[in-house]
């Protein structure tokens, strides 16, 4: 019986956190990060403020929760793709497809977390750690590509950092990701730039 109670509590906690996630997004969309308060989130979720404090202690905790809920599926996908038995180029292509689809599905949250300078200031260290995790997982794919002979011998972590920077800068321009054609164009642009460069002829460096 105690086990059943624990399972029920876990399910209720999951439902509550989903409600608080949606409430936080609603408050951010209406009031911005400066107007994000525990009172407003509790009111939006229809719970007492004391109940909210059982899960989150501050505005920063709420923002970090929203950030984690957005990026954790991306990190998990990177790990899954890296473990697959397929060529490195196919892995990078598949992972980028997933990332663009994910960004399109969560465009509102993506905009709130990455366009707002106030949010960026609060989550700066959290985002830096997230980028480090992403680079480490992408580096495995680049290391594989080097071993396969399809990439030039280079520092895999540096290649992953350059690649991730390219993706982040493209997405921060807030392209119309809801349009499939635009996502496909971005996919070709990012991978084409990475694999083939932008020069029409070889450039001596």
Image (cartoon, grey):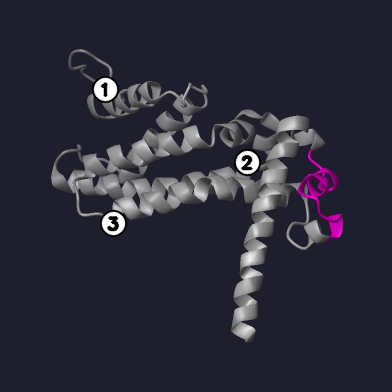
* Farthest-out residue, bottom: 1
Tag 1 secondary structure: loop
Residue 53 is at least partly visible in this image: yes
Residue at point 67%, 30% (across, down):
117
Quadrant in which residue 22 is drawn: top right
Indicate which disc residue 197 carries.
1
- Prevailing SS of the magenta stretch: helix
- Tell me the residue at 43%/23% (across/down): 179
CB within 8 Å, label 1 to label 2: no
Few, some or many C-alpha atoms within 10 Å of disc 1 (few <14, some 14-19, many ≥20)?
few
What is the span of residues highlighted in magenta in the rendered image?
A: 36-50
Image coords of residue 83 (percent x, y): 28, 56
Q: Is residue 46 magenta?
A: yes
The alpha-carbon separation of the residues under discs 1 and 2 comes to 30 Å
Looking at the rendered structure, the secondary structure element under dot 2 is: helix
Instruction: In this rendered view, identify the residue nearer to me: 62 or 182.
Output: 182
Determine which residue is flagged by label 2.
124
Q: Which mark is residue 69?
A: none
Quote the CA–CA distance across marks 2 and 3.
29 Å
Instruction: Tell me where residue 160 appears, x and y as whole percent.
Output: 36, 41
Q: Is residue 127 left or right of residue 100?
A: right
Q: Position of residue 180 (x, y in %)?
A: 38, 26
* Residue 155 in magenta stretch: no
* Tag in front: 3 or 1: 3
Q: Which mark is residue 83?
A: 3
Q: Is residue 58 placed above or below 165 in the rendered structure?
A: below
Could you tell me how far apart the alpha carbons at marks 3 and 1 are, in whole angstroms? 27 Å
């Amino acid at each position: 019986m105690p086990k059943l109670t624990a399972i029920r509590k876990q399910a209720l906690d999951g439902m509550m956190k989903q409600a608080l996630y949606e409430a936080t997004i609603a408050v951010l969309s209406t009031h911005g990060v400066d107007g994000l308060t525990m009172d407003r989130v509790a009111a939006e979720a229809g719970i007492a403020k004391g109940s909210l404090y059982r899960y989150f202690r501050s505005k920063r905790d709420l923002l970090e929760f929203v950030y984690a809920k957005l990026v954790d599926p991306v990190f998990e996908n990177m790990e899954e793709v890296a473990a697959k038995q397929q060529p490195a180029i196919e892995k990078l292509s598949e992972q980028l497809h997933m990332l663009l689809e994910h960004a399109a599905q969560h465009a509102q949250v993506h905009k709130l977390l990455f366009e707002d300078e106030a949010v960026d200031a609060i989550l700066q260290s959290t985002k830096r750690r997230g980028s480090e995790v992403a680079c480490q997982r992408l580096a495995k794919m680049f290391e594989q590509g080097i071993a396969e002979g399809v990439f030039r011998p280079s520092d895999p972590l540096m290649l992953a950092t350059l690649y991730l920077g390219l993706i982040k800068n493209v997405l921060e321009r807030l392209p119309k990701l809801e349009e499939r054609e635009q996502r496909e164009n971005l996919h070709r642009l990012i991978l084409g730039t990475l694999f083939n460069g932008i020069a029409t002829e070889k450039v001596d460096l």
